[in-house]
Image (spheres, coloured by chain):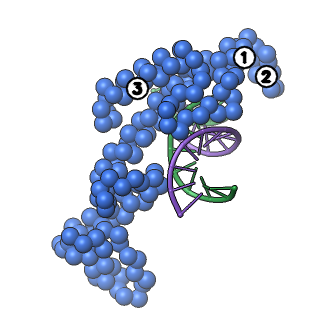
Chain colours: A blue, B green, C purple
Amino acid sequence: MAVSSSSSAVNYLMALFAQDSNSSGSVSGSGGSGAAADSEDSQLGVELQGGQGGQGGNSRRRPPRQKINARERYRTFNVNSAYEALRNLIPTEPMNRKLSKIEIIRLASSYITHLSSTLETGTECQPCLLHKYENEGIARRISICTFCLKTK
DNA sequence: TAGGCCATCTGGTCCT
DNA sequence: AGGACCAGATGGCCTA
């Protein structure tokens, strides 16, 4: 399962490793912010390996933090790529409206339900509403489908 | 200014 | 052993 563009992902990873090897400071341009232990990053990776015997006599050698952090950043990058791909499948007004991650998940779920109702009822005119009437009767409270309300 | 959202770091756990 | 995944902590940015 390749992410949208594997070459850009590879470039991103390369950039991350390059940055990490140069300095362990803040990385990205956007929200990035070295968290609490940012300044200790490189030292933790190296010095703890020496075996200060952390809590409870933990003598396990730790891998260098920089490498682990870079992998985690790359993993987050992949997750965000998936969010972006999913977001591109959701129709909004305007089309390029900014959606938060939670909005992407909720709208995608709602859109799938809407498409499913469209298939089952065979109509694009408020299929979710029609679907509920057919299957559950009027007694149940009817929720409004965002995509049913969208005028064509 | 408070709250929402996000990126990043970190340690723990599970898997190969 | 090393990597993937996850959740918690932290701090920055943005908007109402």
Q: Position of residue B12 (x, y in %)?
A: 68, 34
Image: A47 above or below A121:
above
Direction from residue B4 to residue A101 in the image, left or right: left
- Chain letter of mark 3 equals A
Direction from residue A51 to residue C11 in the image, left or right: left
- Number of the label disc, if any, that sits on residue A2: none
Q: Nearer the viewer, mark 1 or mark 3?
A: 3
Direction from residue A86 to residue C7 in the image, left or right: right
Q: Position of residue C14 (x, y in %)?
A: 51, 49
Image: A3 above or below A112:
above
Give the residue at mark 2: A54
Residue at 53 percent across and 39 percent down: it is: A31
- Give the crowd class for mark 3: few <14, some 14-19, many >=20 residues within 10 Å: some
Residue at 72 percent across and 17 percent down: it is: A48
Q: Mark 1 and mark 2 in contact (Cβ < 8 Å)? A: yes
Name the residue type under label 1: Leu
The residue lying furthest to the right in this view is: A56
Where the C terminus of chain A falls, by quadrant?
bottom left
In space, the residues marked 2 and 1 are separated at their CA atoms by 8 Å
Name the residue type under label 3: Tyr
- Give the crowd class for mark 2: few <14, some 14-19, many >=20 residues within 10 Å: few
Give the residue at mark 3: A12
Where the N terminus of chain A falls, by quadrant?
top left
Q: Nearer the viewer, mark 3 or mark 2?
A: 3
- Number of the label disc, if any, that sits on residue A48: 1
- Residue A114 quadrant: bottom left
Residue at 59 percent across and 21 percent down: it is: A24
Q: Position of residue A148 (x, y in %)?
A: 29, 72
